[in-house]
Amino acid sequence: MRTAGARRARVVSRSRVKERVTRAMPAMAQKANVTFEEDDLPYEEEIIRNPYSVKCWIRYIEYKQSAPKHVVNMIYERALKELPGSYKLWYNYLKQRRKQVKGKCITDPGFEEVNNCHERALVFMHKMPRIWLDYCQFLVDQCKVTRTRRTFDRALRALPVTQHYRIWPMYLKFVRLFPLSETAIRVYRRYLKLSPENGEEYIEYLHSIDRLDEAAVRLAAIVNDESFVSKEGKSNYQLWHELCHLISTNPDKVKSLNVGAIIRGGLTRFTDQLGKLWCSLADYYIRSGHFEKARDVYEEAIQTVMTVRDFTQVFDSYAQFEESMIAAKMETTAEMGQNEEDDIDLELRLARFEQLITRRPLLLNSVLLRQNPHNVHEWHKRVKLYEGKPREIINTYTEAVQTVDPLKATGKPHSLWVSFAKFYEENGQIQDARTIFEKATKVNFKHVDDLAGVWCEYGEMELRHENYDEALRLLRRATAVPSKKAEYFDSTEPVQNRVYKSLKVWSMLADLEESLGTFKSTKAVYDRIIDLRIATPQIIINYAMFLAEHSYFEESFKAYERGIALFKWPNVYDIWNTYLTKFIDRYGGKKLERARDLFEQALDGCPPKFAKTVYLLYAKLEEEYGLARHAMAVYERATKAVESLEQYEMYNIYIKRAAEIYGVTHTRGIYEKAIEVLPDEHARDMCLRFSDMECKLGEIDRARSIYSYCSQLCDPRITPSFWQTWKEFEIRHGNEDTIREMLRIKRSVQATYNTQVNFMSSQMLKASTNATGTVSDLAPGQSGMDDMKLLEQKAQQLAEDVERERPKPKDKILFVRSDATRSELAELTKQANPDEIDIDDDDEEGDDEPDEVPVEQKAVPIAVFGGLKDD
């Protein structure tokens, strides 16, 4: 009963709600015959209770999404009637309406209904950019150009300026869709007032519609605006280059700008790109049909550019222009016919082009000289380019000597003056050449050597024309002491005050005095050179030889000594060498003590590098004019004084001279000293020579002792030749005991070196690891053999090889402990001993040999054999 009553109560309540909803239902819903189902009643009841809640309406709309579209639209309209300022409801409603007409023909009346909905929405939502954007895009899709443009304008007027950045991209995209260039230009102009940084986009659009004049004006404004930052990352030069390219390639379309002034302004602004700018200016005139102006521009360019790169660009463009002019003229002549004026014009163009190609080296030289007007080498090249044109050469030399600053010159500036004077000399104008040289001597060069070169060339010119007295006068004038003396390297003084210390001028004066002057004047010149302390070892030697040629021997020796006082080692080496040689040649053994003193002075402080020559000369003096023991003492001193690399050679000389003077026995001490001092590789050679000498003297034991000593220096694996030599020696002069001793020593030495190698290997292995054992010892068979085990195996293999090579013993009764048998040793002793006396009883020389004498035999007591004899 309760359940039935509850049901009746619910039915009554729903019917009452339905009546209330029907009474509250708007007239629009009633006209549309919209009826409510039972499931709609809760949403309707919620809306009746709170009609101003957006959430209630949204929930109701979401619930009715599957209903017919007019039902959903009716609910949106009811909601917006209650909440006309809700952005969410309007946005969703407009979106729903646009979706409903999507895919239909744009002439369908439904589009206009949607447009009206947007207009109604904008009454309340005119500050919402999203609504404007959706509406504008909807109009764009309908291809309503004028209405769309006006809507965009309304949007820009309605929205605050801070929101315009959302409208402009779509607006600009819209105006670019249709061929309405004037409208688009006006829109862009409005846009650039707000965002001038997007000027490149406008310029690109102007390019696309071929409005190049305005594009050039805009681009010029951007280039002149220093605060402009390109969004495409272009530099100011790149923008300028685009402007130059635009105005130079379109002279008939760009009328609002002064092209020449703009490009020439760029020439002063971008000095590192002059070539391209000059070519752009010339290209402008070429395209405009002003060919003579273009030619003038090219000529001006190649006369003003400063780099080879710019010159190459301009010259190549110039040559291409001339070629195209010739080709065009030839084509015109071929089409229109040929007359005399055309021939003359064509010949003129060909001659102009040929002259341009011929002028290229000279023009390039001018560019390099504009880069550095003080480049002497380029001035010389310019003179060569004018070969065969005397007037141009003179003008070039004149310009060069006036332009080149000696303090900034690259090269030798005095060579310009010298070449200038030689040019006059070669053309027979000697007096003009003298005038040039006189002017050159007054130039303030940077280096004294430059002025000295001028004086020397001046003197050479006079000598070539056999004016010997004049040449002497000039050089004496050059070397005269000035009123104000100055040091040679004092750069604060002019070079004219320092040239009197120039060795170049003094050397030439000395040569001239030797050839043309007197003995007294020549000697005075050399003395003056020495007094000025500018002499070189060669000057000293020349002076001494000059005195010796005139039989002033003691004076020449004094000159050597003055030179020795001026210089130190190693510069004094040549002077000492010449002095000692000349002194010995002059006096021989007459002044032996003086010669010895000279040698001792030369050797005092002599570096080991130069000691060998002096010692050999000293020893030769003692051998020829002194005492042999003094010579030997000199050789002994030499072996200690020379460099370590020359000691071996010096010992060889010492041994050879000692053997020739005193005999070979006197060389024993020298050999011993050499073996003690020299390194191992040379000591081995000395030992072999020493032992060979002892063998020749019959001192076999001494030779064997030397071999034994030398064996300590010879590893059998490295120096097998030594052991072979010793073996041959023992075969010739030894016996089985000595051979056995030699083999024992060899094994001992080999074991010593093996021990050293093993010790070094173990130390290396110990340094490379901190473990107590190797990896293979700790884990056999897992990580392979380590270095120590490899060395041990190699040593064991070597020992087995040696054991295998030895002959097997046949008789074990040996004199000493050894692995060699008695028969083997006897065989070794028989191989090559020339001193052996053959007393073998088994040989039968003939029938007349006496019969064998019987010898009485007696038994030996067993006690004599001890334990050797078997029972």
Image: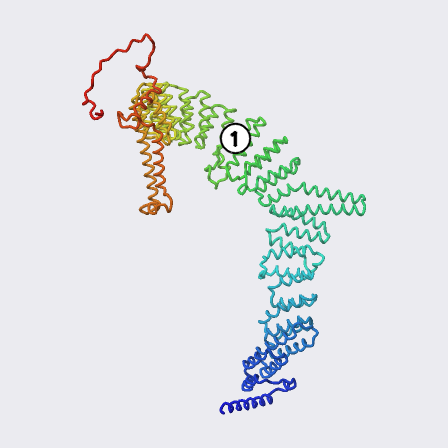
Between 275 and 521, the one nearer to me in the picture: 275
Three-letter amino acid code at disc 1? Leu
Please say whether residue 839 is visible from this viewpoint: no
In the rendered structure, the answer to whether residue 336 lies left or right of residue 721 reads right
Q: In the picture, residue 729 is in which quadrant?
A: top left
Where disc 1 sits, the SS reads: helix
Q: Is residue 584 above or below residue 358?
A: above
Circle 1 crowding by C-alpha within 10 Å: few under 14, some 14–19, many from 20: many
Q: Which residue is mark 1?
A: 475
Q: Position of residue 353 (x, y in %)?
A: 70, 43
Q: Position of residue 530 (x, y in %)?
A: 44, 30
Q: Is residue 524 above or below residue 394?
A: above
Residue 492 image point, x, y percent: 48, 42
Quarter of the figure that contains the C terminus:
top left
In the foreground, 415 or 751? 751
**Residue 249 is drawn in which quadrant?**
bottom right
The answer to which image quadrant residue 647 occupies is: top left
Query: Where residue 132 appears, x then y in whole percent?
Result: 62, 74
